[in-house]
Amino acid sequence: MITLTGLSKTFEKTIHAVRNVDLHIDEGEVVVIVGPSGSGKSTVLRCINLLEIPTEGSVVVDGHELTDPVTDIDAVRAEVGMVFQQFNLFPHLTVLENVTLALRKVRKQSKAEATEVALRQLTRVGIPEKADSYPRQLSGGQQQRVAIARSLAMEPKVMLFDEPTSALDPEMVKEVLDVMLGLAAEGMTMVVVTHEMGFARAAADRLVFIDEGEIVEVGAPEEVFTNPVQQRTKDFFAKILY
């Protein structure tokens, strides 16, 4: 579903955020990317839908090479949902209006069609009763679930999560992770950058450890957690609680 080949990203010609990353993600696979702050993991994620333009290398999503100038990037992006640290909801729109906006503008659905899809996805993330509420009336966890529902409403083939719980109070983290666990169980292809090691243990097919822009180690979560091969990986997990 996703293939990164020789992916590199340099900022201001001197800051090497990502260095020669090769990564293949199969359809239905859940890959969790971890690493210290500033290691380049979010940059790798953002390169998958070209929110960051790679300096070198190629990105292929569902057979489409995004780094090829002839590729319709917007068409591919419509198949790739992304959830950020911040919820990015429109404060002047209701929950239902936030979720239906792209359906009506991009998918050209009627109001009735978009509403049906939106309510189905709000039910999927557990908050259908909040359809007529405004973002300011919701908790952080509820707002993030709306953001997830908004992405799911587009029926993406891939979901990207960039530290989706980092802006939440601790008691709200579980409700978002539970939604993500449900998506993983349904077979959604997911790439997740997170510090939530419990989620990685429960949902990931593979764990990718990145440091200084490079992939240091890849493997099954339990293997990487309990028996890492690389010393840098050992040092990282020795300093965190999981």
Image (cartoon, grey):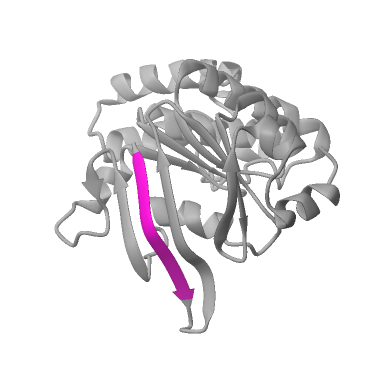
Q: Is residue 155 left or right of residue 180?
A: left
Along the line of sight, which residue is nearer the eye, 133 or 159?
159
| In the depicted structure, whether residue 174 falls above or below residue 59 | above
| In the depicted structure, whether residue 22 falls above or below residue 184 | below
Identify the residue at horizontal 37%, vertical 37% (top origin): 101
Residue pushed farthest left?
70
Identify the magenta region: 2-10
Question: Which quadrant is the N terminus positioned in?
Answer: top left
Along the line of sight, which residue is nearer the eye, 228 or 152?
228
Residue pushed farthest front?
229
Q: Is residue 135 left or right of residue 30?
A: right
- What x and y, as percent, mark residue 83? 52, 42
| In the depicted structure, whether residue 6 falls above or below residue 119 | below
- Is residue 50 in view? no
- What x and y, as percent, mark residue 78? 31, 41
Hey, which quadrant is residue 58 in on the image? bottom left
Question: Which quadrant is the C terminus positioned in?
Answer: top right
- What x and y, as percent, mark residue 176? 66, 30
Along the line of sight, which residue is nearer the eye, 104 or 194?
194
Does the magenta run of residues contain 115? no
- Is residue 101 in view? yes
Task: Please give the count of numbered marks on the rendered protein.
Answer: 0
- What x and y, as percent, mark residue 66? 27, 54
Does the magenta run of residues contain 8? yes
Identify the residue at horizontal 68%, vertical 41% (top origin): 165
The secondary structure that most of the magenta stretch takes on is strand
Identify the residue at horizontal 68%, vertical 39% (top origin): 224
Hey, which quadrant is residue 26 in on the image? top left
Along the line of sight, which residue is nearer the eye, 63 or 219?
219
